[in-house]
Image: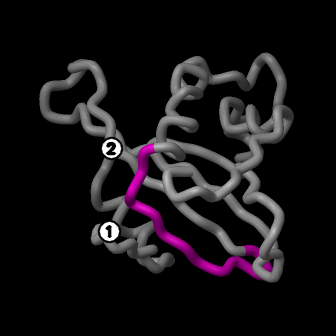
Amino acid sequence: DKFGRKIHIDLEDGIKFMYKNYETSRHEVKTEYYLPYRGKRLPWIRHTLYNSTNLYTRIDKNQREIMYVCKYDLPSYDKDDNKCYWVVIVKKNKKDKISPYHFRTAFAMFKYNNLLKRLERYQPILYSTEV
């Protein structure tokens, strides 16, 4: 990421976010569950990891989770609502100081209030801008 963390994106696990079975609410990698609009956002993952300065963290069971947030302007389909908050989540064992983080999921949030509700569960990661 922008701050030097190593993040591993596994090919099998890395593509699951592009699939969704709405009946089971699970990511099932099957042709009928592929969502093209999620596939189009695949490049946003790397861009977000390399460029985001909006990072938040929490401990989830025995995992340390980092959430990266970037804001994107979508094509103007709707003049009032073309902002998209793109969230990328990575995790690793909280006791592990050496191994890289692992990509878990990525998703879009279109409503600022929904983003704020999600952020309530996290603490910001603050970095000094001084040299």
Residue at image coords 82%, 32%: 11
Whether 38 is drawn above or below 92: the answer is above
Above or below, comparing residue 103 to residue 75 in the picture: below
**Marker disc for residue 131:** 1
| Res 71 label | 2
Residue 28 lies left or right of residue 25; in this view the side is right
Q: CA distance from mark 2 to mark 1?
A: 26 Å
Nearest the viewer among 126 and 70 is 126
Query: Residue shown at 38%/47% (left/top)?
Result: 70
Residue located at (82% from left, 29% from top): 29
Q: Secondary structure at mark 1?
A: loop
Of discs 2 and 1, which sits in the foreground?
1
Whole-percent x, y for residue 24 in the image: 77, 45
Nearer the observer, 119 or 93? 93
Neighbor class of circle 1 (other Cα within 10 Å; few <14, some 14-19, many 20+) is: few
Give the amino acid at mark 1: Val
Q: Main SS type for the magenta part?
A: strand
In contact (CB < 8 Å): disc 2 and disc 1: no
33 vs 121: above or below: above
Please tell me in which quadrant of the rendered image residue 113 appears: bottom left
Mark nearer the N terminus (2 vs 1): 2
Q: Nearer the viewer, residue 82 or 97?
A: 97
Q: Position of residue 65 (x, y in %)?
A: 65, 68
Q: Amino acid at mark 2?
A: Lys
Q: Position of residue 72 (x, y in %)?
A: 32, 36
**Relative image position of residue 30 (x, y in whole percent):** 83, 24
Q: Is residue 122 magenta?
A: no
Query: Is residue 57 left or right of 62 when viewed as pictured?
Result: left
- The range drawn in magenta is 51-63
Q: Quadrant of the C terminus?
A: bottom left
